Image: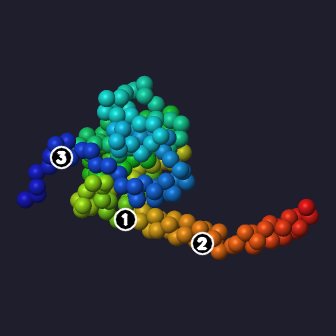
Amino acid sequence: MAPKQKPGRSKQDYCTSPEFLKALKHRLGIENFHLDVAASEENSVGLRWFTEEHDALRPEVSWKDGWAFCNPPFGHIEPWVKKAWEEAQRGAWIAMLLPAGVGANWWRDYVDGKAHVLLLNGRLVFTGETTPYPKDCVLLLYTPYIRGGYEVWNWRKECESELLAQKELSSQSLAKSEPDLLLQISSDLWKLGV
């Protein structure tokens, strides 16, 4: 017998791990999210954020002006994916972290064919938790230009490759002494005829 589901009555305020956010920002090619639409002052990952009291789901609230991030309460997902779809129609770019509820009506109505779905390879451990979240998660990308599509994203590998690239860049700049850099600049200028 399957365990009884408790929508909305289990923990709802999971905070996204910095490691995952770093990999996501790298993938999207951004330094920051301009907006976190489901946050508190303590756990926001955006330059601006909407708290529960501000209610990002109100019709007059816009999620536009850069990438918005959304890790909504998992107990009531449909209003969040519906709003993300509507906002994408108005030009917004949204990255939304959710459990992979592929059998749910909200998935059929507001995800399949409407968002680009990144199936997360590697379970997430949310901030403050000691064990991985027990369900598979997805990252939904809603934009005015991308419609549908599915891919498996090994986000940990992306995080590792970014770290390796940073280390290599750092070691290259450390390996060159000031005279070497000046010589390289002089050589480059000479080649340009300056």
Secondary structure beneath label 2: helix
Q: Say which element carries label 3.
A: loop
Q: Distance from label 3 to label 1 (Cα)? A: 24 Å
| Quadrant of residue 121 within the rendered picture | bottom left
Q: Nearer the viewer, mark 3 or mark 1?
A: 3
Residue ID at (54%, 45%) = 145
The circle on residue 171 is: 2
Q: Which mark is residue 112?
A: none
- Which of the two discs, 2 and 3, sits closer to the camera? 2
Task: Check disc 1 and report its element: helix, strand or loop.
Answer: loop
Q: State yes or no: discs 2 and 3 in contact (Cβ < 8 Å).
A: no
Q: CA distance from mark 1 to mark 2?
A: 30 Å
Q: Is residue 77 visible?
A: yes
Residue at the image point whose x is 43% and y is 28% from the top: 61
Q: Is residue 149 left or right of residue 172?
A: left
Image vertical order of residue 161 relative to residue 56, above or below: below
Circle nearer the N terminus (2, 3): 3
Check disc 3 and give the amino acid type. Answer: Ser
- Which residue in the protein does label 1 denote? 121
The residue where tag 3 is placed is 10
Q: Nearer the viewer, residue 47 or 115?
A: 47
Q: Amino acid at mark 2?
A: Ser
